[in-house]
């Protein structure tokens, strides 16, 4: 039966899918669409025989809604069948609350007085309270609306939800302009991918230090939770993301040739191998305070991230990570020294500039005559002072976070999504 069903439904759209529910059966059939009834289910469910027509109608309906928002004056309107993957990166925008009109204020006061009289006479469970409460909610909800100033800098994302409803998210689309990168000055010493690898190594070393300091780990955990729950910060702005996800610090082997720093998750897997998956809670309850502290420290360390991704720029999270690195007292140079593989990955001009900065112009000019890149890399590595570290790996490298986009700290719900309805009348 399952094989027959797969054959019948190849290249068809389930009539319970979000896209089909969004356009509706009547609209689909009005355009000549046909449906194959699912013989293996009860009811009228089946499969739309023309998936292209379903997509076309859904996109047309989405575009029509998008045009309404554009007409209202929203700066950016995005419409797609799927929920945009990057919404979590945008600061959510919420409706402003206006003052009630004189009539609204009078009605709200009258409703409150009537509810109070009913509850005193009949109790709070009186059936007469619910209609009044619903009316009050409707009035107060009507006081919330996006104004024209918000629309002028705001964006709207529209998509089809799994249940066929219209998914919506309002966000700030126009951030404070950042200075444009200029190529007139000297080229950076380290390429984007190399900076990412160096900051991953730095992250691994700081993780190692935090994993041995339970008191600091507890402080980090409390700071991250307090920042998010008390001060409205977002998890992606914190060096510690309070999620059950280990931060990978994998880098090419040649960059770790001179270091024995292991990933913290490997050490944790060895140290706490005895904790069972089944009965874990009971096992943790029975652990000594010392083992619990070590477990906390290791788990907190595993979720810390100071990596500057390739093409990215340091932000608030990296500033937070520098605070943690400094608090840990870690000596990065004692845990990692620059291997020849680092200099092999750098541009020839960058190697000369590095030598000029760290050793002096005469040494740089002398090495500039070396023809082979591999020989130049060896010479540079030998001339640098002991315990030298690339700038991205030094503690304090990202102490000053770049300015976050304006309104980036607005409270955001779990999905960064608002489901408010928006019409012309809602614009204040």
Image (cartoon, grey):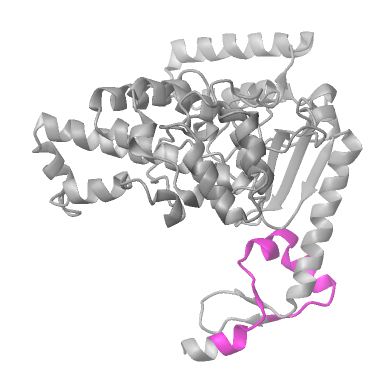
Tell me if residue 154 is in the magenta stretch. Answer: no
Return the x and y of residue 252 as percentages of the image width and height: 46, 55
Q: Which residues are magenta?
A: 6-35
Return the x and y of residue 323 as percentages of the image width and height: 44, 21
Quadrant of the rendered image containing residue 264 = top left
Q: Could you tell me which residue is drawn at 63 percent across and 45 percent down?
A: 191
Q: Could you tell me which residue is drawn at 43 percent across and 37 percent down?
A: 202
Tell me if residue 19 is in the magenta stretch. Answer: yes
Depth check: give the residue in front, 198 or 315.
Answer: 198
Q: Residue furthest right?
A: 71
Q: Is residue 418 visible?
A: no
Q: Is 102 drawn above or below residue 197 in the view shown? A: above
Q: Is residue 301 visible?
A: yes
Q: Could you tell me which residue is drawn at 25 percent across and 27 percent down?
A: 213
Q: Is residue 128 left or right of residue 207?
A: right
Q: Is residue 214 left or right of residue 258?
A: left
Q: Could you tell me which residue is drawn at 52 percent across and 10 percent down?
A: 117
Return the x and y of residue 420 as percentages of the image width and height: 68, 35
């Amino acid at each position: 039966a399952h094989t027959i069903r797969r054959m019948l439904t190849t290249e068809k759209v389930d009539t319970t899918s979000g896209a089909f529910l969004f356009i509706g059966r009547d609209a689909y059939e009005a355009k000549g669409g046909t449906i194959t009834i699912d013989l293996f289910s009860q009811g009228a469910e089946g499969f739309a025989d023309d998936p292209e027509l379903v997509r076309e109608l859904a996109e047309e309906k989405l575009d029509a809604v998008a045009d309404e928002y554009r007409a209202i004056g929203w700066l950016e309107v995005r419409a797609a069948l799927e929920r945009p993957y990057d919404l979590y990166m945008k600061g959510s925008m919420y409706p402003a609350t206006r003052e009630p009109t004189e009539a609204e204020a009078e009605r709200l006061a009258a409703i409150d007085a009537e509810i109070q009289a009913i509850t005193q006479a009949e109790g709070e469970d009186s059936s007469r309270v619910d209609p009044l409460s619903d009316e009050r909610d409707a009035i107060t909800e009507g006081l919330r609306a996006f104004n024209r100033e918000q629309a002028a800098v705001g964006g709207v994302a529209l998509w089809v939800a799994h249940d066929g409803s219209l998914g919506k998210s309002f966000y700030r689309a126009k951030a404070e302009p950042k200075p444009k990168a200029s190529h007139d000055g000297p080229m950076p010493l380290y390429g984007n991918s190399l900076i990412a690898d160096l900051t991953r190594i730095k992250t691994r070393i700081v993780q190692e230090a935090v994993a041995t300091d339970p008191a600091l780990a507890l402080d980090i955990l409390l700071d991250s939770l307090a920042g998010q729950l008390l001060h409205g910060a977002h998890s992606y702005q914190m060096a510690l993301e309070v999620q059950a996800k280990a931060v990978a610090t994998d880098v090419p082997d040649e960059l770790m040739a001179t270091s024995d720093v292991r990933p913290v998750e490997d050490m944790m897997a060895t140290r706490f191998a005895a904790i069972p998956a089944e009965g874990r809670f009971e096992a943790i309850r029975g652990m000594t305070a010392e083992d619990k502290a070590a477990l906390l420290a290791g788990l907190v360390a595993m979720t810390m991230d100071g990596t500057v991704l390739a093409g990215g720029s340091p932000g608030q999270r990296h500033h937070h990570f520098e605070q943690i690195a400094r608090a840990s007292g870690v000596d990065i140079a004692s845990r990692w020294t620059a291997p020849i593989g680092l200099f092999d990955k750098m541009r020839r001009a960058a190697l000369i500039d590095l030598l000029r900065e760290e050793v002096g112009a005469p040494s740089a000019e002398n090495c500039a005559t070396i023809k082979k890149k591999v020989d130049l890399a060896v010479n540079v590595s030998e001339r640098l002072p002991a315990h030298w570290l690339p700038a991205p790996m030094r503690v304090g490298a990202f102490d000053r976070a770049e300015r976050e986009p304006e309104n980036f700290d607005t409270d955001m719900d779990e999905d960064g999504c608002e489901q408010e309805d928006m019409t012309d009348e809602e614009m204040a």
